[in-house]
Amino acid sequence: MQSSLAALRPALPILIGASVMLTLSMGLRQSFGLFMQPMTRDISISVSDFTLALAVQNLVWGFVQPLAGALLVRWNYRSTMLMGSLIYAIGLALMATAGNLLSVIIGVGILIGFALAFTTSAVAVAAAARSVSPALRSMVLGIVSAAGSLGALLAAPIGQGLQDLYGWRVGVAGFLVLGLLMLPAAWVAGRVESGESAPDRRLFSVSAAGRAELRRWLAEPGDPEGVRDALMVKLRAAAFDDPAHLLPELEHHRATHANRLTAYRVIESRDFSGTLDRQRALQYQVLKSGIRFEQGWLEWCEETLGLLHELEQDRPRREKK
């Protein structure tokens, strides 16, 4: 037990930051019901209107979660969590100043729903897990996940007390102050920068002997390799039989190359946009080769499928002859 605690010590700031962010994000959201009755009376909306905003929030939260995962890879944990925390605060500010249904849907529904995808379990747990070794991740996941249920114990009494004394708008303003605490928590938790500080990350360097071997290999000439594909042999053989038997296989080839091309395009937009230095430009050339290879295959598949369909249509006429 003591060894586990000692191993956790370097990651404690990250774990505390992730837990605080998750606690506040979930706790504030779970306490919005406190303001439903006074808010609906004050701005003349119905209870169903308020629940509609919460439904929009859940939908936006679900739809945006894949985007949050993509931005963690594209950007980093700190930028992603800070953006979510800031949007959360803006949503609370709009809720505190709401005067009609539209402002409630935008603040409570869209903005806070969007922010939840960047500040709740998926991102907070990922940041915490990345900061410790695999042997400790189960314990850390349990601790950070449990923190999400503690926020309501903090937020609800504060919101209720402020609302009883000064009204619901001041109660939501109190939530806004609590929400602003997510910003420093996200900053601290963001020390996990896309795996750079992960304890199980292995760093490698090229030795002098390895660099010399690399240079020798780079200078060694090589012959271009030919393309060998069983489909080409089948296509030649099909000239003596019914080529229609190859249609399913060609369709499969077309789908496979289309999927690869899509994956390469995603990598291109993610890793090679903007101005590139020499090293990145050379890496981009490798990707371009793969893109053009898949494009060539797709064009060939389309052309060959068209030819096979024409032959299939002409087969009854040829058989009559």
Image: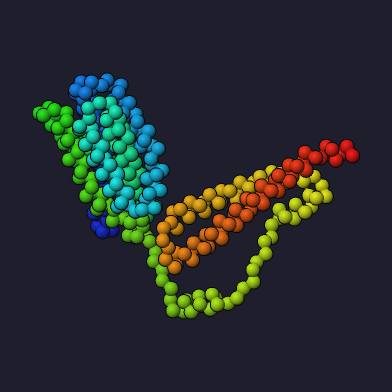
Q: Could you tell me residue 96's position as x and y percent? A: 20, 32
Q: Could you tell me residue 64's position as x and y percent? A: 38, 40
Q: Is residue 43 left or right of residue 211?
A: left
Q: Could you tell me residue 220's position as x and y percent? A: 58, 77
Q: Is residue 263 left or right of residue 75?
A: right
Residue 220 higher or lower than 3, as above or below: below
Asked which quadrant contains residue 5, the reply is bottom left
Residue 274 higher or lower than 26, as above or below: below
Residue 130 visible in this rendered orientation of the protein: no
Q: Is residue 60 left or right of residue 211?
A: left
> The C terminus is located in which quarter?
top right
Report the coloring of the rendering: rainbow
Q: Looking at the image, which residue is at 82% across and 47% down? A: 241
Relative depth, front residue between 254 and 25: 254
Relative depth, front residue between 304 and 14: 304
Residue 296 higher or lower than 286, as above or below: above
Q: Looking at the image, which residue is at 35% across and 37% down? A: 61
Give the farthest residue toward the right: 321
Q: How many marks?
A: 0
Residue 86 visible in this rendered orientation of the protein: yes
Q: Looking at the image, which residue is at 34% across and 46% down? A: 123
> The N terminus is located in which quarter?
bottom left
Q: Could you tell me residue 308's position as x and y percent? A: 74, 45
Give the farthest residue toward the front: 275
Q: Looking at the image, which residue is at 13% across and 27% down? A: 167
